[in-house]
Amino acid sequence: MSGVAKKLGLIHWLGLGIALALALLLAAGAGSAQETTGSYTNPVSRGVFDAFPDPAIIKGKDGYWYAYGTTDPVRQSFGDNSFHYLPMARSKDMVHWEYVGDVFTNSNRPTWHPAQDTYYWAPDIRYLDGKYYLYYSVAHFGSDSLFTIGVATAPTPTGPWTDSGGSVIQGETCPPTTNIDPAEFTDRDGTRYLYWGSYGAICAAKLTPDGKRLANPTDVTQVTYGGQAEAPYVVRRGDDYYLFISEGGCCSGALSSYEVFVGRSDSPLGLFKDREEVSMMASRRGGTLVLAANGNKWVGPGHHSIATDLSGQQWFVYHAIDKNNPYLEPPREDINRRPLMIDRLDWIDGWPTVRAGAWASEDPQPAPVSAFAVGDDFNGDTTLGAQWRREGAAQDGWQLASEQDAGGYVRQSSPSSKPSYLVNSGQAPADARAEADLRLPPGSTGAAGLVAGYRDPGNHVVAWLDTGAKALVTDVLVNGQSTGKVETQLPSGFRFDTWHNVAIEERGSDMSVEVTDARLGDPLAIQRRTLPSGAGGPGSVGVASRSARSEADNVGATALYTPVTRTAPYPTVGPVDYSYSDEFSDGKLDAAWSWVRQPAGKEAGRVYTWPTQDADLYGDRNDASVLLREAPEGAYTLETKLSIDLGIDTDRSFQQAGIVAYANDDLYAKLVHVAIGTGRRTEFAKEDGGYGGMMVGPPAGTTWLRISHRIDPNNGEQEYRAATSRDGEHWIWGGVWTFPADARFRIGLVSMGGSGATAKFDYFRVYRP
């Protein structure tokens, strides 16, 4: 959501020292290809944009990556305080960006809603049926307020944009949510879906084949429970669908609590569950953390899209806030400064996480692979040079051509019943990713293919877009003999006459092939097969044509990325230090405890029972009791086992209980199981001149809570990181809040937020590493 909307209405956790940090930095590299591409430092929009919220990204057919952002005064440093209506940027490497205009201006804004007091937020970019589709949020304020979603199309990534003339989701009946933050997803059968929602439920529905309206406005599926969820984004890996959402407060300056969660399903409409098998439709909603604040300068990371570099490595493209510089300058000082960020996205044991769980980076990182080791985008060429050789049939048919969108590309203009090849004279590595954008003319009955591991016409791998079979067809030739063709059906409405990206990845004897519209995580076909002896390995990359005129662009290969397989380490907890702990086993609090305000609760039966008070520690209301004791010096972890009945699906105020690190009523960190409306969550909150609350793992009737403390050796800041568990053994570690070095904290318990529930604490323990 936009900063305007809010106005109107690690370094990861390391307790193991510098040696371990260096080891993790080395482990974070994603393969030799990335090691040769240089580095980047966040934010990548530095020097071009002051802010670039809610970024959406796509790789255009001209070889550039294009990014689109929410309406904000994104160019203030250039003397421009105006709002840019969906600003656009492009880059050859995802690191160095240039401003290329805005989707809408005052002269071409859509006319189906009021122009005054209307903002355009949260774009989503796709390539469908040979055109670029930009879905966007409409936020109109005033007595006739309107929140909805529009879509515009263009022949190139920068326009000219033609709006569809109306709302995409007009007439929808989803449970209460703000109808913004769209994301399109195309399934393998060609069905198109739209996901949307903000600060309520996330909803999903099928789109019409042209992608411009809901197919049935009353057939809408709620895919998450309500609350603070927004910014959905869906990808498919194998047979699994992953729904990413952002959660928390996007735009509260240094107290922004944005973070990203994900759930997995075998259907695009759910049921989505997290890695603990907790449903995202439960009132104690599930969701596995992908990205959260990690203790460095970045807070509130989220609202993302996903890009794939030329090595096959995926990248999280998102915004975050520098806690030391969170707002724009006057006269826009009430708008958050949310610059464009990128970081590596890793898939570990079937689940995604940014930088193996180290999350947002602030130091130099290996950059995306943005140039082929061998290959060409054919832009700027006047002739096919010596690096390309023609083999097989119709060799003279291979010629350069050009168009507005793709720029330069190559065309085989002489159909032949026998394969014709255009291959690069360079040699790709043994483990490589090859790709090409392929297209066939309307009415064609032939095939266009990507070839890899090419040694000669009788020894290579080929992946055909075959119009006759209406399928992705792969073949592996060894010594002139086919080792077997494999077909994977393409959607019934597949447009062979528009560009599609075909990618072949070879890792040892394992080969995978993927067909996508634009490499955005929604493959139309995936095929995996094992290469026979003598196939694959080092060889040339190129394209092939059979029985048709065919066209190809962005043809090349580079070393395949090396997956990261281990997550960053969690805090070291250590043994119990009983001098700071209380097992609540002798019928009375030990002498180390003291109270802020009146005593409450009672120790009996080996638990401390404390009814939630009709009192709070929020803003100016500071009337809740706090049970405290001194904290040890240095690193420690406090833990409790909490049982509290907050009901299920019943509307509650803010009853809550949990653990706290407390300096005073306006400076603390707390981790509580809390009821908010009909939802239940574990909230890790900070108050320091304002309030921000992150979510950790899903709670249960009995939930174990931890807050781990350490001192950052680089700046002396105190860092608190939260963790929750539903069984006391398997812990989910969440985000980090930071505090000044000189703040003096005590540690303890709270039970507050409204009467009507009873908290039972089994113990209060402090662990020392």
Image (spheres, grey):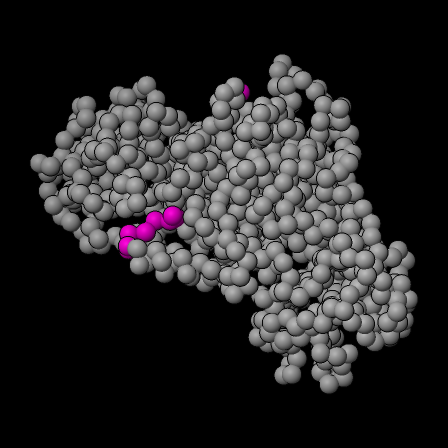
Q: Is residue 213 visible?
A: no
Q: Quadrant of the N terminus?
A: top right
Give the residues drawn in magenta, as a range: 7-17
Name of the residue lying farthest toward the bottom? 479
Coordinates of residue 314 in the picture (x, y in percent): 56, 55
Coordinates of residue 218 in the picture (x, y in percent): 69, 35
Assign the magenta stretch its main secondary structure. Answer: loop
Does residue 514 appear to the left or right of 583 in the view shown? Answer: right
Front residue of this view, candidates 687 and 456: 456
Name of the residue lying farthest toward the left? 591
Does residue 230 appear to the left or right of 661 in the view shown? Answer: right
Coordinates of residue 144 in the picture (x, y in percent): 65, 16
Q: Residue at x 60, y 25 (%)?
A: 80
Front residue of this view, candidates 479 and 685: 479
Does residue 691 appear to the left or right of 639 in the view shown? Answer: right
Q: Residue at x 64, y 34 (%)?
A: 87
Front residue of this view, candidates 167 and 768: 768
Q: Residue at x 48, y 38 (%)?
A: 320
Q: Is residue 9 magenta?
A: yes
Does residue 393 appear to the left or right of 258 in the view shown? Answer: right
Q: Is residue 555 magenta?
A: no
Coordinates of residue 558 in the picture (x, y in percent): 62, 65
Q: Residue at x 78, y 47 (%)?
A: 405
